[in-house]
Amino acid sequence: MENYLVVGASSGIGKALANLLAEEGHRVYATYCNNETVSSHPQITYHQLDVLEDQYNLDFLPDTLNGVIYCVGSINLLPFARIKPQDFVNDYQLQVIGATKILQASLTKLKKSKNASVVLFSTVAVQTGFPFHAQVAASKGAIEGLTKALAAELSPVIRVNAIAPSITDTPLAGKLLSTEDKKQANANRHPLKQIGSAENLAECAAFLLRKATWMTGQIVHIDGGVSTLKV
């Protein structure tokens, strides 16, 4: 049994990953901010945590962590002319500074593991330009840079990788997929003609955590082919 911290685990990808790891017999320490928790799996314990706080208590974690997964994020799509500078700052605080604080607080515990791994989340929009994605691509671009820098600095003790998904059917993307017409239109943009699921991303994250022992510093595209194929 291994110990994993899943930050942002009350819904979407984080919830799916927490359940998957628990079903495999691991101990999951899952955090949430405002969303109501719904899983009652005995291997999962929930703790309220606001990553925007200046200080928070991680005393609920064990002495050794095998992995940390930061699933907290936002999707704010606006024309560039309508984005305020503070909007960029807010996203950076949530997605980059939040991840940084969690990892700094967990570093000693991760270093005690013989197979420690960190998984962060980017977006396909960083390396494939889309209109109205300036805000999300800017902060997630910083996540990709952080991933590679930490992978170099923390090797060989801790592996660090990131997943760059396309649109995924989760509550976070609810406004973009609020009708069947929207879902179909988004699905049709992808060569595989479907939208990703939380389970698709959770399976990839679990692989990076436990099986990908010769992978670090990678940005893994789980995106229905949209970043590389034109069909």
Image (cartoon, grey):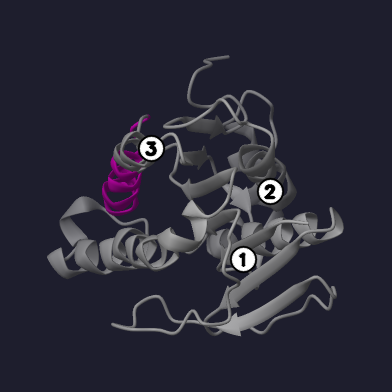
Q: Earlier in the sequence, mark 2 or mark 3?
A: 3
Displayed quadrant of residue 203: top right
User: In x, y percent, where is residue 152?
Assistant: 33, 34
As rendered, which of 14 and 224 lies closer to the eye? 14
Residue at 65 percent of width and 71 percent of height: 29
Which residue is tagged 1?
Answer: 171
- Inter-mark Cα distance, 1 to 2: 15 Å
CA neighbours of label 1 inside 10 A, class few (<14), some (14 to 19), many (20+): some
Residue at 69 percent of width and 26 percent of height: 192
Which residue is tagged 3?
Answer: 151
Q: Which mark is residue 202?
A: 2
CA neighbours of label 3 inside 10 A, class few (<14), some (14 to 19), many (20+): many
Q: Which mark is residue 23?
A: none
Q: Is residue 129 above or below residue 54?
A: above
Give the number of the mark in front: 1 or 2: 2
Q: Earlier in the sequence, mark 1 or mark 3?
A: 3
The quadrant of the rendering that contains the N terminus is bottom right
User: In x, y percent, where is residue 59?
Assistant: 51, 82
Amino acid carrying label 2: it is Ala
- Magenta highlight range: 128-146
Instruction: Say if mark 1 contacts mark 3, CB within 8 Å.
Output: no
